Image (cartoon, rainbow, N blue to C red):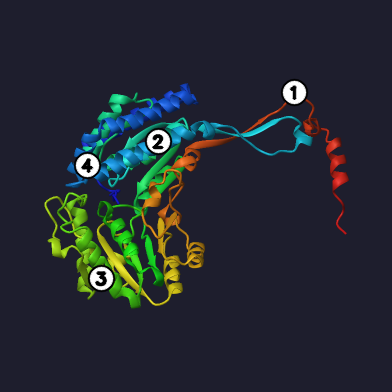
Amino acid sequence: MTIINRDAPESGADEQAIAALRQAFEVQKRAFLADPCPSYETRVSRMQEAARMLRDHRKEIGAALNEDFGWHPAAISDLVEIMSTSERVEHAIRHLRTWMMDDPREFNTALWGDAKVVVRPQPKGVIGNMVPWNFPFDIAFAPLGEMFGAGNRVIIKPSDLTPACGALMARMVAERFDPSVLTVVNGGIGLAKAFPTLAWDHLVYTGSPDVAKHVMRAAAENLVPVTLELGGKNPTIVAEDAVDQRSVASIIGAKRFKAGQVCVAPDHVFVPRGQLGRFLDLAKEQCASATPGFVQSDDNTGIISRRHMARLTGMVEQARAAGCEIIDLDAASGGVPSERRQMPLILVIDPPAHLDVMTQEVFGPVLPVVTYDNLDAVLDSINAGERPLAVYLYTYDKPLTEDILRRTTSGGACVNAALFHASIVSLPFGGSGNSGMGRHHGVEGFREFSNPRGVLMRSDGPDGLEAFNPPYRVLEAIAASVMTEPS
């Protein structure tokens, strides 16, 4: 969600950060050339150290998240930024020997004899990781499972919207890792603009599609391969048979998670027109019974900045001015913004398609509820827009489930759930079209950060390769025996 002002002047601090970046990049490039294929043991050691580093700094990580967000629930800090991140690294460790193995390929033995033909995963080299503000530690360190597993070196650039987290990351990494293996560079707009201009061996950017276009243009100057993990308006479809307490609790819970500041959060929900009243009653009941007093409780994550709060409240006020029904699901518990930048969960009922809440990624605790009469029209509207990062479907009808999965395209999908497919470490995570390109997590992440090098090893025994040396008499004879003139 960070917007880079391409015309913003660079500060003196930015100039220092850019100089530090270039120096770190050169150090890692030289180190890679000196050791281009680290051993299995070296890779595992680096991965284990990354996981230990997070667990050892648990309290400091929680404090830094609180400082940057105004308030950040301790359970979410532990679950996502430490436990989930460590689990992903440990998953990569468990499978690394298999991932590193040569992959034999079929070939013509009559021509090649006893040759060996394999795909051998090779480290790419130096990877840059541009980290967003919403999950600063998770998105900085979880990919190390696959990046280190693939044998690479990494430079991390945290978001300038999480300065406390960025400073802690830099200190943690400096204490545990040689800068030729892993380093963190903090800075402002100038650094963000300079980062993708380097000749990386691979570049990862997580954020908004608008900024991704600038990143990709800059990377293209050096033909740098990119992984873009972007956002989008993730639709949630509730079918006629699934307007029930279980579905509504799942949707509300997913939207509550980190106050909706998640790239895979439900962005808007489609509800059958005739069941809107039931859906709203269930949503109000869920919030009143399960989370009374939620807004200013320790379970409600703060909004990252005053500017983002103003953007969200502006969306709501625009919808109100347009005549939309606005429902504050936390009004009964004092649903007002707090000094910790905490906000209530707000429903916007049937907003017109031109409003900001329907054209922009919400990325906060505001949920448009769009009624429908015809499910085909819903799918048409989804497919007419940009491809989302995720599609969520609530139904108990298996044929309908398969039909909707077949007729929509997205980076990921959940049935009768939302959000948490991204936490399954063995599932590839990424987008499609406007929501991104490339994948990480699990074996797909290892492959993303590896060069799949095709290798032919000719045997010492007889083969048919001599036929390809001129003069081509043998080839002419072979061609004559297998080809015929057209009739």
Question: Seen in the image, is 479 located left or right of residue 46?
Answer: right
Amino acid under disc 4:
Leu
Residues at marks 1 and 2, CA–CA distance in whole angstroms: 42 Å
SS class, disc 3:
helix
Name which residue lies at 27% across and 36% down.
186
Q: Nearer the viewer, residue 303 or 277?
A: 277
Residue at which label 4 appears: 65
Residues at badges 4 and 2 in contact (C-beta under 8 Å)?
no
Residue 220 quadrant: top left
Amino acid under disc 2:
Val
Q: Quadrant of the C terminus?
A: bottom right
Q: Nearer the viewer, mark 4 or mark 2?
A: 2
Instruction: Tell me which numbered mark, 1 or 4, is placed earlier along the sequence.
Output: 4
Residue at which label 2 appears: 89
Above or below — where is 282 with respect to 35?
below
Instruction: Tell me which numbered mark, 1 or 2, is placed earlier along the sequence.
Output: 2
Q: Nearer the viewer, residue 486 or 98?
A: 98
Residue at which label 1 appears: 460
Residue at which label 3 appears: 281
Amino acid under disc 1:
Asp
Q: Nearer the viewer, mark 3 or mark 2?
A: 3
Residues at marks 1 and 4, CA–CA distance in whole angstroms: 61 Å
* Residue 76 image point, x, y percent: 26, 45
Name which residue lies at 22% across and 43% down.
74
Instruction: Tell me which numbered mark, 1 or 3, is placed earlier along the sequence.
Output: 3
SS class, disc 1:
loop
Q: Nearer the viewer, mark 3 or mark 4?
A: 3
SS class, disc 2:
helix
Residues at marks 3 and 2, CA–CA distance in whole angstroms: 42 Å
Residue 7 visible to an observer of this rendering: yes
SS class, disc 4:
helix
Question: Seen in the image, is 263 located left or right of residue 407?
Answer: left
